[in-house]
Image (tube, grey):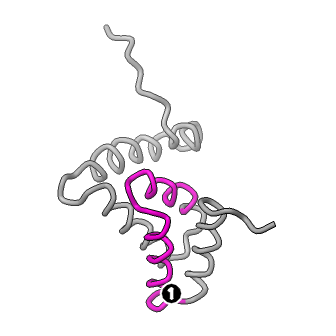
């Protein structure tokens, strides 16, 4: 019998005790399967995910996905350009919320 334990993930830490099945599906299906499919690179998946979050105004989730996009090879300049481009398609308020969140997460705050 193996004593190998799976590492504690962000989902497990964040809500695993409250919603264990959702944490399991997040880890095993979303990030363990969908994000690993070869048809899109992780960089492209990050761009698509960030665009969806911006379009739907999901600022809370941007806290996880904007830094992950940077880790996956999206530059800060590209993320800002994505937000700028989407402003004309998904609405100015969504873009303003997203750029504010991006600055909080990635940029230097004004004094």
**Residue 16 vertical position relative to residue 55 in the rendered view, above or below:** above
Residue shown at 45%/28% (left/top)? 7
**Residue 85 vertical position relative to residue 24 in the rendered view, above or below:** below
Is 60 positioned to the left or the right of 88 in the image?
Answer: right
Q: Position of residue 75 (x, y in %)?
A: 44, 63
Residue shown at 76%/68% (left/top)? 110
Q: Mark 1 points at which residue?
A: 87
Image label count: 1
Is 107 positioned to the left or the right of 46 in the image?
Answer: right
State the predominant SS element of the stretch in magenta. helix
In the displayed orientation, state which residue is furthest to the right: 111
Q: Answer whether residue 78 is magenta in the image.
A: yes
Nearest the viewer among 94 and 43 is 43
Residue shown at 41%/20% (left/top)? 5
**Residue 99 vertical position relative to residue 67 in the rendered view, above or below:** below
Q: Answer whether residue 4 is magenta in the image.
A: no
Residue shown at 57%/81% (left/top)? 94
In the displayed orientation, state which residue is furthest to the bottom: 88
Q: Quadrant of residue 52?
A: bottom left
Q: Mark 1: few, some, or many residues within 10 Å (few <14, many ≥20)?
A: some
In the displayed orientation, state which residue is furthest to the top: 1
Q: Position of residue 23 (x, y in %)?
A: 47, 43
Q: Position of residue 44 (x, y in %)?
A: 31, 63
**Residue 34 vertical position relative to residue 45 in the rendered view, above or below:** above
Magenta residues? 62-91
Secondary element at image label 1: helix
| Quadrant into which the N terminus falls | top left
| Quadrant into which the C terminus falls | bottom right
């Amino acid at each position: 019998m193996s004593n190998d334990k799976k590492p504690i993930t962000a989902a497990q830490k964040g809500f695993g005790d409250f919603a264990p099945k959702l944490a399991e599906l997040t880890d095993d299906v979303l990030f363990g399967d969908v994000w690993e499919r070869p048809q899109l690179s992780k960089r492209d998946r990050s761009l698509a995910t960030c665009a969806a979050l911006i379009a739907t105004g999901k600022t809370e989730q941007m806290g996880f996905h904007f830094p992950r996009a940077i880790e996956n090879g999206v530059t800060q300049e590209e993320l800002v350009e994505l937000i700028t481009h989407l402003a004309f398609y998904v609405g100015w308020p969504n873009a303003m919320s997203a750029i504010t969140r991006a600055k909080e997460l990635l940029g230097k705050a004004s004094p």
